[in-house]
Amino acid sequence: MKEINYTKIAKQLKVMADPKRLKIINLLSNGEMCASEILKAFRVSQPTLSHDMKALVDGKFVIARREGQKTFYRLNPDTIFDLQAALSEICNENINL
Amino acid sequence: MKEINYTKIAKQLKVMADPKRLKIINLLSNGEMCASEILKAFRVSQPTLSHDMKALVDGKFVIARREGQKTFYRLNPDTIFDLQAALSEICNENINL
DNA sequence: TATAAATATAGAAATATTTCTATATATTGG
DNA sequence: CCAATATATAGAAATATTTCTATATTTATA
């Protein structure tokens, strides 16, 4: 019987629960991008995007890498994979009986 | 090339992004329960749980069924399955090139 | 070193969410 | 029909989130 950390999973879901952040994840699924490139895909201010990127990094969805003036972001594929596994576990408790 | 409905996915994630609601989903994964049974698993008021159940029903995670005085809830397994598929799609756009 | 470019942080306003108390509705049994 | 039980709704207070403007920090280059 595994212990499910609902609080942790909920926090990560909360980070993803935004159309803009989902689209950022999708953009990064095609490869690394810097902040100013990502910004072009949205109609929000630069600080707003910076805030979203911080949330994605803090939630371990995205890894940041500084190169000169630019910050490059790439996906951390493990996180969504683990999250999906956790959701499966939550929905299929009976399997472990 | 599929169209991804980020807004819809974000709304569903927002419904799930709460420890209590995740635990409710987990409880229901073991079978149907009525509201008063679910309530015993938490330290919240009855209206709070009612509000959460409504969110889960509106988000199609849970199906409600009235039987006499009681409302029984059960999982709608398709929804989380579809949501997981959508997340996979978001994270693996390159696969469709 | 001064300036420009890229990004981050601070702080505030607007909006959304959570969760309560009070009350309403629906159903059953006497 | 009345009372009890189960659940839902209304409305408000507390809290959290979103997103802006203004400003600070970091880095490269003239």
Image (tube, coloured by chain):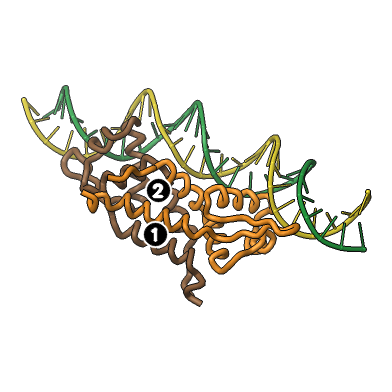
Chain colours: A orange, B brown, C yellow, D green
Mark 1 vs 2, N-terminal side: 2
Q: Chain of mark 1?
A: B
Q: Amino acid at mark 1?
A: Leu
Q: Residue at x 65, y 59 (%)?
A: A43
Q: Residue at x 26, y 47 (%)?
A: B28
Marker disc for residue B75:
none
**A7 versus A92 height, above or below:** above
Q: Residue A87, percent across and down?
A: 36, 53
**B10 versus C18 height, above or below:** below
Q: Chain of mark 2?
A: B
- Asked if both marks, 1 and 2, belong to the same chain, the answer given is yes
Q: Residue at x 39, y 60 (%)?
A: B84
- Residue D10 located left or right of residue C11: left
Q: Secondary structure at mark 2?
A: helix
**B25 versus A84 height, above or below:** above
Q: Residue A83, percent across and down?
A: 42, 53
Instruction: Return the residue at label 1.
Output: B83
Q: Residue D19, percent across and down?
A: 63, 49
Q: Amino acid at mark 2?
A: Met
How far is disc 1 from disc 2 in space, using C-alphas?
11 Å
Between B25 and B12, the one nearer to me in the picture: B25
Between C27 and B82, the one nearer to me in the picture: B82
- Within 10 Å of disc 2 (Cα), the crowding (few <14, some 14-19, many 20+) is many
Q: Do the residues bearing badges 1 and 2 touch, measured as CB atoms within 8 Å?
A: yes
Image quadrant of residue B89? Answer: bottom left
Q: Residue furthest bottom?
A: B97
Image quadrant of residue D27? Answer: bottom right
Q: Quadrant of the N terminus of chain A?
A: top left
Instruction: Return the residue at label 2.
Output: B16
